[in-house]
Image: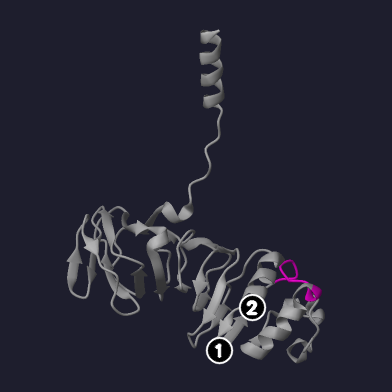
């Protein structure tokens, strides 16, 4: 019986499924392409000091201080740190800024090619500005004061988030940026409508298709609320009834 019990225990243990790891606990790793010479905007901040890990020939400087692998980077006294990054090596390298949940501010812009790649899933961001290809992930569980995505295609997904819009850029999904499904836009519009806006800042969506058009009946109540809070002037033409969508051309006049 003892042998049978041991065998059953091992068998059950061998097939027991382990839950997926909290993405916030994953390393906040940015991969830097070979030969990268510092360019563009690269800003970051943390909820607390983080230990940096660097691989390859990548170099990192902040405010004139060079950081080596194993060093501790303090939380910025202002909104963010400005990063100076180079990789003179023949191979890609990485910079890891602690855990994803420790990242609170991310602004990567004006990088034409996907020379820096990362996954934002699990980051606890209050500011998210991405204008570079190569940054991917799920925008979920954040408390955002600004959301600005420009020309990143469908590289990100949208879950549900809180908005406390204090930044004058508000919410921008511009260029070819788009979420893949209508449900994501329903959640975005609902979250934005039920968020806090300190001013009538922009809410702009420029790219969309008939396939990802949120049904007007699903969003019209939130649209009415959002029109009172934000400076919302642009939606994709494919969402309008004249473009094959479900939104009336008079949607900006809707009051509920």
Task: Estimate the x, y position of residue 243 in percent, counting from the top left.
Answer: 78, 78
Residue on which the image places disc 2: 194
Residue 64 drawn above or below residue 169: above
Tell me the quadrant of the picture where the N terminus can be found: top right
Q: On residue 251, which mark appears?
A: none
Q: Say how many tags the image has.
A: 2
Q: Residue at x 25, y 59 (%)?
A: 58
Side of 227 where 172 appears, left or right: left
Q: Residue at x 55, y 91 (%)?
A: 199
Which of pointers 2 and 1 lies earlier in the amino acid sequence? 2
Q: Tell me which secondary structure the magenta stretch mostly adopts.
A: loop
Q: Residue at x 29, y 70 (%)?
A: 75
Rate crowding at label 1 as few (under 14), some (14 to 19) or many (20 or more) other CA atoms within 10 Å: some
Side of 225 where 13 appears, left or right: left
Q: Quadrant of residue 50?
A: bottom left
Secondary structure type for disc 1 = loop
Q: Quadrant of residue 183?
A: bottom right
Q: Is residue 27 magenta?
A: no
Q: CA distance from mark 2 to mark 1?
A: 15 Å
Q: Residue at x 58, y 73 (%)?
A: 176
Q: Quadrant of residue 186?
A: bottom right
Residue 240 drawn above or below residue 4: below
Highlighted magenta segment, given as a residue range: 209-217
Secondary structure type for disc 2 = loop
Task: Estimate the x, y position of residue 212 in percent, counting from the top left.
Answer: 71, 68
Task: Estimate the x, y position of residue 99 in percent, counting from the top left.
Answer: 37, 56
Residue on which the image places disc 1: 201
């Amino acid at each position: 019986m003892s042998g049978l019990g041991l065998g059953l225990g091992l068998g059950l243990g061998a097939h027991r499924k382990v839950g997926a790891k909290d993405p916030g606990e994953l390393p906040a790793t940015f991969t830097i392409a070979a030969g990268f010479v510092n360019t563009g905007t690269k800003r970051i901040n943390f909820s607390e000091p983080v230990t940096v890990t660097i691989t390859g020939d990548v170099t990192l400087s902040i405010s004139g201080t060079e950081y080596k692998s194993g060093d501790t980077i303090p939380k910025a006294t202002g909104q963010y740190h400005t990063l100076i990054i180079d990789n003179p090596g023949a191979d890609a390298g990485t910079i890891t800024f602690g855990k994803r949940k420790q990242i609170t501010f991310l602004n990567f812009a004006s990088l034409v090619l996907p020379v820096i790649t990362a996954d934002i899933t699990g980051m606890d961001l209050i500011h998210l500005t991405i204008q570079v290809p190569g940054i991917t992930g799920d925008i979920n569980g954040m408390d955002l004061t600004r959301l600005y995505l420009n020309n990143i295609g469908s590289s990100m997904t949208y879950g549900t988030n809180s908005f406390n819009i204090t930044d004058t850029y508000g919410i921008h999904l511009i260029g070819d940026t788009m979420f893949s499904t209508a449900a994501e836009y329903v959640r975005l519009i609902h979250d934005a409508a039920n968020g806090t806006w300190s001013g009538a800042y922009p809410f702009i969506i420029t790219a969309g298709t008939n396939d990802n058009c949120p049904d007007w009946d699903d969003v019209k109540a939130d649209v009415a609320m959002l029109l009172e809070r934000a400076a919302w002037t642009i939606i994709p033409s494919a969402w309008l009834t004249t473009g094959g969508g479900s939104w009336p051309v008079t949607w900006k006049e809707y009051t509920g």
